[in-house]
Image (cartoon, rainbow, N blue to C red):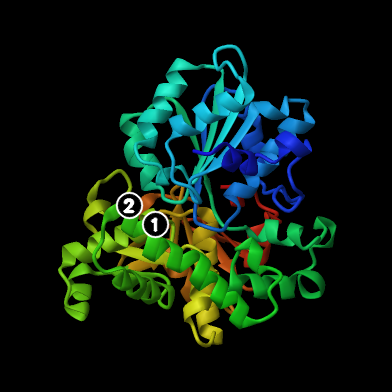
Amino acid sequence: MEKVKLEEFNHWWINGKVDVELALSFKRDVYSEIVEQIDKRFILALVGLRRIGKTTIMYQIIQKLIETRIDKTNILFFSFDEISAKISEVLEVYKEIHKKDFRKEKIYVFLDEIQKCNNWENELKKYYDLYPKLKFIISGSETLFIRKKTKETLAGRILEFILTSFTFKEYLRFNKVDEKEFKYETIIKPFFLNFVEKGGFPETFSFKSDKEFKEYIRALVIDKIVYKDIPRMFKIEDPEFLKVLLELIATNPGMYIDYQSLSKQFEKDRRVIKKYINYLQESFLINLLNNYRKGSITTLRKRKKAYPADNALIYLYKFKIEEDFFGRMVETLVVNNLKATNFWKNGNEIDIVYKDTPIEVKYQEKINNEYFKPLKSFMKKFKNKRAILITKKEERKINIEEGIINLIPVWKWLLGVNKYELYKL
């Protein structure tokens, strides 16, 4: 580890502030939650898909620390995405540069894309246990690197924040739409339609052409994960097949995952397909929903439904967005917004079950009584008194024998602009 490389990463040691291009002025909703934990003992982990702003949040926190008069040399940043090194090498070179005593001084250590560092979890544990004054903030783009290893090595030492792409509310705030102007037809509609189609990767918001947008998602998100991140973590033999599975799911959001059928379709061992789909999930490219069974483990044996983690992935692979398909993109947006983990299918089908509440998405001009049947069936079976039907534009409350069904337009639901306490799930 060369001194000059470390000094390049930490330009505030000389300039006294973080470059504005790195610590952008716009702050994600989760930023304040992370900052609240900055002086607590836990290791803070920012985990999520590539290109959604994890590194930016790190730089924003560094700038805030500088503004609160933390000694600028007591803040260390290093990215394993660019240089191969051990944590011990980084810290020892840092000590040599600034003559720091880890036992006496509070040092904030930011380690970006830490999963690319071999044996990082054991090194981190050693320094965490030996030097209580070191505060570690780490980031990574695969969930498995946190979940599997920290259970064994860093249990009780780490607090994880899972970052998603931008929410619709953040997207509007980014575009300087005031909450007081939340009027759909005159203000919100064009933003909503664009967000549903192209998703929430912040660096794409300024792109003017489809070509520029798709090249960005393909090169900087998909290809880096499929050809670099996943093969490095899991030693897979056929990264091209990962892309095939991802495109299949992206162009069929909400599809059922039938491993036997996929095995026949692609002439691959079903165990290989199951592993590859798991890799896509662990890398935050897709989300899998289980069939809801209250108080039962049978959900583990049932078929799952798969959604791309952001609508940008759909837009990348879908040549044309037809009107009917747009409704499936709305459904995908709602699933991802809730970080949903369950649907329900038992004769009838419910798109999402969230905190035991059934939620259906019907992006239709007119809502008819047929749409209420699955919700009624679920409410009757599980003795649930509430349900939500997310609509294109209808907003009303329906009292039925089983309880109450609340209808709310999707844009209002996404923004939390609602009249009923029921929506506050």
Compute the Cα span from label 2 to label 1.
6 Å
**Looking at the picture, how far across and down is residue 388, in whole percent?**
54, 59
* Residue drawn 82% across the image and 74% down it: 186
Q: Decide if residue 215 is on the left or right side of residue 280.
A: right
Q: Decide if residue 137 is on the left or right side of residue 209.
A: left
Report the amino acid beneath label 1.
Asp
Residue position marked by numbered label 2 in the rendering? 233
Report the amino acid beneath label 2.
Met
Q: Are marks 2 and 1 in contact (CB under 8 Å)?
A: yes
**Looking at the picture, how far across and down is residue 280, in whole percent?**
36, 61
Crowd rating for badge 1 (residues with CA inside 10 Å; few <14, some 14–19, many 20+): some
Describe the element under mark 2 as helix, strand or loop.
helix
Residue 36 is marked as none
Please tell me how many numbered marks the rendered image carries: 2
**Looking at the picture, how far across and down is residue 257, in whole percent?**
29, 68
* Residue drawn 74% across the image and 36% down it: 14
* Residue drawn 40% across the image and 41% down it: 146
Residue position marked by numbered label 1 in the rendering? 229
Asked whether residue 331 appears in the rendered view, the answer is no
Can you say whether 372 is above or below 54 in the image? below
Asked whether 122 or 185 is in front, the reply is: 122
